[in-house]
Amino acid sequence: MQRSIPRSTPRLAQFWTLKTQWLWAIALCTLIAILSGLNFSAYYSPSLNSDQAIHVLMAEDLQLPADFYYWGQDRLGSLEPILAHGLLTLLPLHPVVTISIVQYAILIAGFWMFARFFKQPLISIILALVWFLPLDSFVELVLPAHPYRAQFLMVGAALLLGRQLLTKSRPGKALNQPLTLAAIALCAFLAIWISDFSVLIFFCLAVVLVLIRLGDRSTSADQTANQTFWQRMGLSRLDLLALGLTSLAGIGFIAFAKSQAMRRNENYGTLSSPDQIWAATTHLAIAAWETLTFQHGPLLGVHAVLVLGSVATMGYLWMKGRSHALRLSPWFSYFLAAAVLSFAALLCLAWVYHNRVSLRYFVPVYLLLWLAALSFLQSLSGPWFRCLGLLLLGTALVSSLTLPNVLSFKRPPSTIARLQPLQTLAPAAFIAQPGGPYLFCAVDPANLDCTPASVNWKAACDADSPLSNSQERLTRISRPRCPRCTRRALAAPTIYPVKGKWLEAVSSADDPFPREMQQFGLCLVKVGEPIQVSSYLMAPYRLKTPKPKTHAPSP
């Protein structure tokens, strides 16, 4: 006689199947994050450059309020160096390690916040690929010193708070709504501090929240006529007070931080001319066509074809869903609208045009479009969910494969590892190509200093260039990105100019370094033979000391 199978078995099997899917998803997301960290964290990156090394130096030598923004700029708030500096005061770690920890803590926190919008394991895996191993054109999302991950951390936090506000979480607490509104405003102003472009993203979020709130609180025409706009929004005076005070504090903080910046770029927020906008649009259209026709390599070509296939599939499902009551999340509308407006705004910015329409500026558009696609996917079920899900998974996988050396077992050594021999020269300083000197002292920021070469440097010293008035000369240095770094570098016992284009005019076949050079009005004299460290050639110099004056003997 056969024993009957309990009715709870299918439900139990379904539960364990879903649990297994999530376990696999968590394991894969963790592996993807680890692969990303081993390739793109400041400590492991084989392509760390001078601009990225500045965050390492800021973590070691943070000076507020001067360092509220990235050295030498009035934009790109220094959230990561500030957090890394705090960590450095608590733990005996190397500055590049603390920057790497903060870099990936922010990246993981941002991923977690957006992953909470999606309920299926497959969507979390796709998001992890997009987030931690993005398309090579948008790799700045994970590289050190770029603002995008911190910016979207704030966007994700504001979205979670906004969703809580709309779902009326814990309505019994009187202070819940004003505190939530204040927290959203705080996230907005922190994001604007981190990147000025966040103004547009949070403007779109504010509009969407208002429209959703008004739609949820629709009332009769008679009731609406007797209510103010704020009453129709369900906002009390306490809510408005919390929102207003936080906004005033945020505006004041950003104004104060910008007032402390060492220099300002007046053209940063200006608009392009119509001809420049057309040129930028044409440039992107030609690049897209060349990618689609496989002129930029097979992987990028396959990725472009998969993107077109995904867009076509979503368009077909949307048209089909109009007659089958396809219910799209309002967050889909937000992500798509923010992406379109961000793309249009970037095309209109003169800064983007003058920087050759670099795709790194379009990282927010990349993320917003992917979030819109994943929100669309979540609204599906059954065969169409599996079909579009596999198509988007393939797109994300191919985009991750465009990154060099991610899956290679023989990755090149990290930049920090290659420059470790520089520690043996400490205490010392380095003078390098203008715009790129700071990488050399990231190995040991406490004992090594760096400065770019003076714009008007000379290969021979003037007659009055010795240190008769050195302190006055040092205090007048204002042109470098970090004047205090230049002052420390010129006071180092040994200074190593690093061979580069800036030395080519005075280089000879026998010795690329002149016998003496004048930097920032001070005379440096060569005191040794050139040495090779990694791929860099440098020579030791010291400040020329004045000859002691001899007095005639008294009669």
Image: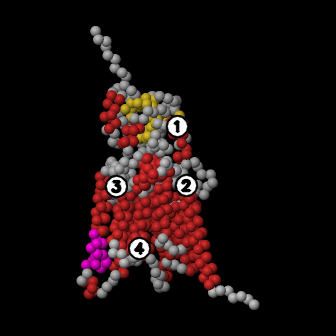
Secondary structure at numbered mark 4? helix
The residue tagged 4 is 163
Q: Quadrant of residue 470?
A: top left
Please state which of the two labelled residues, at mark 3 or mark 4, is closer to the viewer: 4
Badge 4 local density, few (<14 within 10 Å), some, or many (20+)?
A: some
Please state which of the two labelled residues, at mark 1 or mark 2, is closer to the viewer: 1
In the displayed structure, 495 sits above or below 187; it is above
Badge 2 local density, few (<14 within 10 Å), some, or many (20+)?
A: many
Secondary structure at numbered mark 3? loop
- Mark 3 and mark 4 in contact? Answer it, CB < 8 Å: no
The residue tagged 3 is 268
Q: Identify residue type, mark 4.
A: Arg
Which segment is the magenta one? Answer: 228-241
- Disc 3 versus disc 4: distance between alpha carbons? 34 Å
Residue 424 is tagged as 1
- Disc 2 versus disc 4: distance between alpha carbons? 34 Å
Q: In x, y percent, where is residue 173?
A: 36, 75
In the displayed structure, 90 sits above or below 286; it is above
| Mark closer to the chain start, 2 or 4 | 2
| Mark closer to the chain start, 1 or 2 | 2
| Mark closer to the chain start, 4 or 1 | 4
Q: Residue furthest top?
A: 555
Q: Identify residue type, mark 3.
A: Tyr
Q: Identify residue type, mark 2.
A: Asn
| Mark closer to the chain start, 1 or 3 | 3
Q: Quadrant of the C terminus?
A: top left
